[in-house]
Image: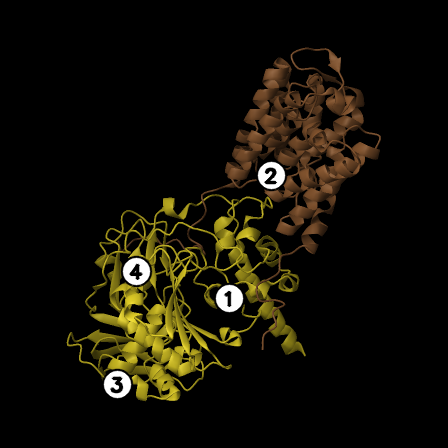
Chain colours: A yellow, B brown
Amino acid sequence: MIAKTFPRGGSEIPHRKEATEHKPIVTLAPPQFVVIPLRQHIGAPCKPLVAVGDYVKMGQKIGDTDQFVSAPVHASVSGTVTAIEERVLLNGSKCLAVVIENDGKDERHVYPTKPVDKMSAESIRQAVREAGIVGMGGAGFPTHIKLNPPKPVDTVIINGAECEPYLTCDHRLMVEQAEALVEGTKAIMKAVGAERGILGIEANKPDAIEAVRDMIGDAPSLSVTVLQVRYPQGAEKQLIKAAVNREVPSGKLPAEVGCVVSNVHTAISIYEALTKGIASYERVVTVSGGAVVDPRNVRVRIGTPLQALLDFCGGTLGEPAVIVGGGPMTGPPVASLEAPVVKNLSGILALTAEEVGFDENRPCIRCARCVNVCPMGLTPNMLGALSHHGRFSQAASIGLMDCIECGLCSFACPSKRALVTWIKEGKAGWQAERAAAQAAK
Amino acid sequence: MENLRLIVTPSPHVRDKDTTPNIMFAVLISLIPVAAASLYFFGFNALRLILLGGAAAVATEAIFQKVRGRQITISDGSALVTGVLLALSVPPTLPSWMIIVGSVVAIAIGKQVFGGLGHNIFNPALVGRAFLVASFAQPMTTWTGPFDTVTRATPLVVGAARSSLPDLFFGSVPGSLGETSVLAILLGGIYLFYKGIIDYRITLGVLGSAAVMSFLTGANPVFELFSGSLLFAAVFMATDMVTSPYTPKGRWIFGIGVGFLIMLIRTWGSLPEGVTYAILIMNAVTPLINRWTRPRIYGQGVHKS
């Protein structure tokens, strides 16, 4: 069988997953203090539901809001709330967070459950919301909203591409928790009313493909689609094109073409929430990179300091050139190792200077590599230059807002120009410009 | 560990290994077969012109940047590429001072006045060459045969009937330094294609449209492609990244346009060879080609429910 892929652009990039792809997930004991930020998702921050001095159980909801786009947060240990204060996040910004002193008892707060086949779509969404589940691949979009698509959906696609270099947490989860993945997929299908589920997995994970296929058995509504190893195969629009050959119109959601896409880890968390009443208070994080002594896939409580996670993997060798939160192509740089693990953090990568491959910036020589690799058919050289010079409306007229920020243009550029960075700035600039124009009316 | 300094740079945090100097270096490598062929056929003259052309180009770039108070970037290799390309496109008997003047013009007027690497509209080597042809028409169109110093007409002037195909293929014909040997040019071209530096669309566009044009005008396509500087230009000159389109469709249009103009000038122009002007004209319309041939953006023009 020929692996499927998207038709335009893309590139084979070094995947560097050898260090962790065959290492079983190991569990990191929870730390003495956890820091639970009240915003770990796209949307409105939560308000604390607890006060300093309160005793909380593991899994207990400690922050929520009545805003539509948001997701509640939960205690990841049992113990006493010692502070509710601003704490630093991975990217260096600050966020109100609940600090809990762990009593080491892991006393669980369990949510009532009901067999999934007896649940209505609405009750699944409600349970997913109460469990605080957000997109765990990196985006952090509240899952219960995704499970309520604005248009009829016939296909659920599970994103097992994991096309970012280094990351292997989804890979290991597919191998080790295939049953939870398949059952979670069925629950998503039920919530959105889709008749088929496709699990898209890149061809470089044969053990995951086999494990998921075995678990599916002869279930007629489910299938595995083997995807070509090609970045950004796991980008939503590219994945949909590869799996079902549908093209999401510019500026629209996957539901426009009858699809809902969910990440592997998210689907598994949905299963855990629905069948075991477990809220989203832990996740698997890949700790890797050439500067990490003992790279691993680690199951870790939300709120664990990044430093503890790195130390668990032997710490770093020498001085890493950069520490990344998530994958190296799209993940933000880590500004502080005091920052806690959050729900959408898929990896912590300590990269050596050699891995980063730094070289000085040079002028564009119009080699067109960025144009050739752009999976969206854009001209990143032009978008980058226009954005960099503040010509946002002109950039917008040639597709600025269609950029999916996969970073492949910057990766491919032989002059090491910060194309995707300028494009991101351009998008923000264009939105600000439009908002200002709107306000002036 | 507590004192770990964290460097905050935007993603992506991994980069392709290829760099602009690497690309320029690879172009120089690709010129080894043609340079070797020119040394074999034209001896010391080839060595003299290549060294002077290259050195003058690099020196001009350094002086220009120094005078303008800019960072000196000769180590990126681009000036050397321009100087060597120019030298390989002139006749073996060209006086030394003329190649130096050509290189100075190529870098100063062809490249630096536009802002240096990446900002020039016209292929710098061809700007230098056009300047030399316009200023020193006779020395720029006087060719000696290989292994001797007797002035001879090139195959393009003599015509197809009097040139043997094996001579054209191996390069044992009068002509500019690097342009006579089809074999050497192909070797360099294959290397550049393998390294992903030249786009087959441009090269095939030039060769294809020139072949069709020569067929239509009753000329011998194989002879037209193998003689003069057409093949050299299709591989090394028209494919210059900076001055050719960056869109896939645009590169076809560019290549086809170059081939068409070459044959137009060869057939009906007053010059025996039209490669330089054909490429310079297409360089001029490259920004427009880019604008007209932007790829279709994913998700645009899709109508669904």
Same chain for mark 2 and mark 4? The answer is no
Quadrant of the image containing the N terminus of chain A? bottom left
Confirm whether residue A303 shows in the render: no
How crowded is the residue under tag 3: few (<14 C-alpha within 10 Å), some, or many (20+)?
some
Badge 1 marks a residue whose secondary structure is loop
Q: Are marks 1 and 3 in contact (CB under 8 Å)?
A: no
Provide the residue designation for mark 3. A111
Relative side of B73 to A359, left or right: right
Q: Are marks 2 and 1 in contact (CB under 8 Å)?
A: no
Provide the residue designation for mark 1. A245
Q: CA distance from mark 3 to mark 4?
A: 28 Å
Provide the residue designation for mark 4. A286
Q: CA distance from mark 2 to mark 4?
A: 45 Å
Q: Where A397 sits versus B118, above or below?
A: below
Q: How many marks?
A: 4
Image quarter for residue A120?
Answer: bottom left
Badge 3 marks a residue whose secondary structure is loop
Image quarter for residue A69?
Answer: bottom left
Provide the residue designation for mark 2. B70
Name the amino acid, label 4: Thr
